[in-house]
Image (spheres, rainbow, N blue to C red):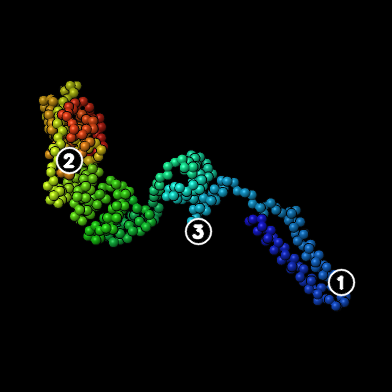
Amino acid sequence: MGAIHFWSVAMLMVIATTATLVVPLFWRAHDAAGISGASGITPARRRWFAFLTAAAVPIVALGFYAWSGRPELAVAPPAPASDIATQHARTAMRGGGETGGDLDAAIEKLRLRLASNPDDTAGWRLLAQSYEFQGRTAEAAEANKHADGDVPTVAVAPTTVPDAVSTRLAQSAEQHRRAREFPQAIAAYAELARHGGMSADQWADYADAMGGARGELDDEAAACIDNALRIDPDHAKALWLRASWQTQREDYAAALVTWQRLVAVLPADSPDTRIIAANIAEARAKLPAGARSSPAPARVVLRGSVRLDPRWKNRVAAGTVLFVFARAADERGPPLAVLRTTAGAWPLEFELDDSNAMMPGRKLSDFTRVILEARLSRSGNALAQPGDLRAVSAVLNPRATQPLLLTIAEEVRAAPTVKGS
């Protein structure tokens, strides 16, 4: 309570109390005017008594309060800077009547607001003060840098932490979708989207549910697919749905690009690669005649020989399976070209071109940065296994490469993560 407010209330209370005592005395004196009182107290004396009482009551009350009260509390001391920052942080986050919550919640709301409005210098100052109050000096220094313009301002989308409502809606939507109760699934996904809790998986599943309910993927489903790919550009299901939607619209050129991108995302041993290969072949077959009859590019071929390091001579039996393959240097996915043969007299000659492609839509001639590998497989398995022997080239351009010589000298110590080899 401010000093003016306090003293105003105090004065009104004194006046009310004084009036309660004085007014009856004054009117008694007035009524007694012209009447000779037996008591000997004249009306003039009664009026003077009333006036003296009116003056004495506030003087006595204030004197008593000064002696026994604490008048310094009527004026609140200035809050420390840290408390001001705390109060402002809470107030700034209330946004039209909402409760600010505790300081951590207020700071988090302020941080998220600044992520979408990074030019708010006053906001960064407030965030720095709030961090200082909590003893988070490193974060405070960073916030002050933003306020001073020393840090490039880049809007960063806040990480969404699923709350109880989002979790319940996501579970409900998934259960309905799996049960092929598509209208209920669509309603749950729509509510989850309004709640702001959608992931790339859920956007893709939302589009999937729309396609199941309507018998095809429409523009609304395509918007959901776009949302999924904005979150995760390599989301396999979203890419599959986009290629399907493009095929449905008879945009075979775009579908071909999307199918090829999907191949690069999937593991080399994915069971879906054969299906995608058939879809790629279909897209190519349905391209306009002019596109299909365009002049074929010059043949791209990798030639060379493979020899065995002499120290492994006694460890490699004749007939051991030898794989020679080229893979994309910058993408995941199955090899671009593969040759399978058996070890015999060294060196072994090899030649790789598009005829050795594993998939029709993923060819050696489509890439300019490849890696060549030769591997002796003791098990005959195309995937590398501990104990296999191999040679790996540097990154090369298959269009501008002279005949190569690969020397098998390295032993595979552990099975690597599959990325296309």
Q: Amino acid at mark 3?
A: Gly
Q: Which mark is residue 41?
A: 1
Q: Amino acid at mark 1?
A: Ile
Q: Nearer the viewer, residue 300 or 138?
A: 300
Instruction: Identify the residue at image location x=28%, y=46%.
Output: 234
From the top left corner, tell me how far across and down residue 127 is, in percent.
Answer: 50, 46
Of tags 1 and 2, the one toward the viewer is 2
Vertical arrangement, residue 151 with respect to residue 164, above or below: above
The answer to whether residue 318 of the structure is visible from this angle is: no
Mark 3 lies on residue: 97
From the top left corner, tell me how far across and down residue 87 is, in percent.
Answer: 55, 51
The answer to which image quadrant residue 27 occupies is: bottom right
Q: CA distance from mark 1 to mark 2?
A: 125 Å
The quadrant of the picture occupied by the N terminus is: bottom right
Q: CA distance from mark 1 to mark 3?
A: 64 Å
Horizontally, residue 169 falls left or right of residue 299, namely right
- Could you tell which of marks 1 and 3 lies nearer the N-terminus? 1
Horizontally, residue 100 falls left or right of residue 6, namely left
Mark 2 lies on residue: 363
The answer to which image quadrant residue 61 occupies is: bottom right
